[in-house]
Amino acid sequence: MENINLKDKYLNFFESKGHIVIPSAPVIPENDPTVLFNTAGMQPLVPYLKGEPHPEGKRLTDVQKCFRTNDLDEVGDKTHHTFFEMLGNWSLGDYFKKESIEWSFELLTKQLNIPVERLAVTVFKGNDIVPADTESAEMWKNQGIPEERIAFLDDNWWPNMESTGPCGPDTEIFYWRSDEEIPTRFDPENDNWVEIWNNVFMQYMHNQDGTFTPLKNKNVDTGMGVERVTAILEGKTDNYKSSIWKEIIAKIEEISGKKYDDKKYTKYMRIIADHIRAIVIILGDDARIMPSNKDQGYILRRLIRRTIRYAKQIDIQIDSNWEQELANIVINEYKEYYKELERNKEFILEALKNEKTKFNRTLEKGLREFEKITRNIEGNIIDKDLAFKLYDTYGFPIELTQELAHEQGYTVDIEGFKTKFEEHQEKSRAGSEQKFKGGLASTGEMETKYHTATHLLNAALKKVLGEHVHQRGSNITAERMRFDFTQNEKMTEEQKKQAEDLVNEYIQMAIPVERLEMSKEDAIKMGAECQFVERYPDIVTVYKIGDISLEICGGPHVSNTSELGVFKIKKEESSSAGVRRIKAVLS
Ligand code: SER
């Protein structure tokens, strides 16, 4: 079958229907320290789905860079990826079900030439809150989808009935991916029916008290996974056999001298292909994430070190230029859609090379150490000290030790490792505070201080201006902080002075900053401040600063407010409608 450039077909089609093609938002979310990555096309659009006007208008379409850590360990089979692309089109209070369904049908059957016989759809069955979506079912019938291919299901609600935030009934489109005869009736239990597109009619807000209220607008939010649908359209059951991966797999074959179809190597090649793409996209983001031991940097480090380990498995010479060659292919293939890749090319290549060199220095020794460990231990548990040694001396992310252990029938004392790891962190934090006192501040420390100052400012503004103040964004560098918050009027000189004084008072009070972990539900019950309820995971970290501040936040933070120094507001200005911005510094 022909190669399909699904992205261009999709974006051009919706452009022809009056949509503006907007660039992908960064894969590292802006203004939201609580989630590490963007995981869906709609995620950066939440404020607009809630009713804020979008500067580009009411009809939008894009291809969004998405990354999901939860699939990391699954990568290696035919269908899982860490980084993937999601196509979507949105109506922000403009068209609704009719156009959405008609256009989906038109794109699938006319542009992508899918025979209607291969399609089936599901719609919402209804419950005591919202009636069955017979409207959508009728519209599908009018398009030519027969009744037996339309199923009413409980699950057709996005994201689900439990999550709070904007939501609504959805209609999902399925494709028959099999050479077997197509059954007349759609059966949701039959895996040959594969979901290819999800159209959400986002019209409700699921509030924290459990009630559903209508959103300001009736919106449409759709999502289509590029990797899956491309493979389907090209007639492949293995995603990695589609045109998307062709060049990269060919390069891996060339460098290693091994064949993808050789079952001994297929899994390793899939992992390398998936990870190198993810690595380039993360490094290419303007957020300039570097491999490190926390947050996105840690995920990045894991991806790179994992890639290197699997490259070794297929006999790639680690100190050759292989990773640069692979990264260049990804940059070239994706720069048309993600311009930042070109802009950040040098940074990508260099960061990747440095991390490789660093790990490669200890990899060999680490693997030998691992063998020695397993030769010498009694029983099948790798204890905390050995796991920590592999981490600390040989740079093995704990997950790598776990993988190696698992492959050979050992288990790792993870809890013990975590305890040891935390003790070690306490020590090195104490160490770096010492250094800081000696005048050797690293940027990380200043940024950490600004993070905590943000919480204090948020609390102070609530006191001075009122409880309507909520964070709408923040941006921190080693030199200053920027804080956006909900407030209509310009602040008076006196209000600015009051807020500044309050923050300095909190600093003077030398309040300990506590880090708590709890369920999102409990955090909200406790009244924790949060910016994007719907985006948090079920378990969240909450930072508590005495009874001054309680916020869901990913951190990092100082351990006592007294570490912050003197706080000064430099500027207060308008950011956008109903949002003011403060720039401030610590000295
Ligand atoms: N929000 C829906 C999804 O992620 C449609 O974009 O599937």
Image: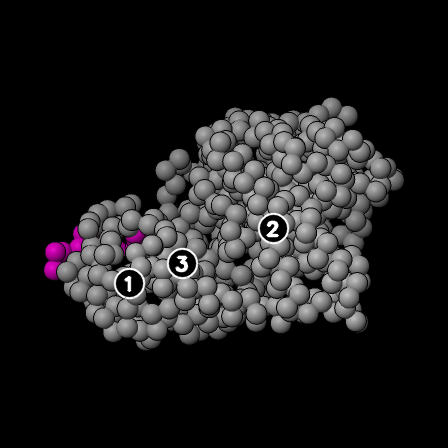
Point out the tag, 3 or 1, that comes first from the N-terminus: 3
Label 2: few (<14), some (14–19) or many (≥20) C-alpha neighbours in 10 Å: many
Residue 255, quarter of the rendered image: top right
Q: Residue at x 79, y 63 (%)?
A: 375
Q: Is residue 349 magenta?
A: no
Residue that mark 1 sits on: 564
Between the residue at mark 1 and the residue at mark 2, the CA separation in whole angstroms equals: 32 Å
- Residue 302 bears which disc, if any? 2
- Give the distance between the C-alpha atoms of the residues marked 3 and 2, in whole angstroms: 29 Å
Task: Answer whether residue 378 is visible to the viewer in this image.
Answer: yes
Q: Residue at x 58, y 59 (%)?
A: 392
Please name the residue that numbered disc 3 is placed on: 531
Circle 1: residue type: Leu
The type of residue carrying mark 3 is Gln
Q: Nearer the viewer, residue 187 or 102?
A: 187
Q: Which amino acid type is marked by label 2?
A: Arg
Is 232 above or below relative to 550? above
Residue 357 figure quarter: top right
Q: Position of residue 224 (x, y in %)?
A: 62, 41
Residue 379 vs 256, above or below: the answer is below
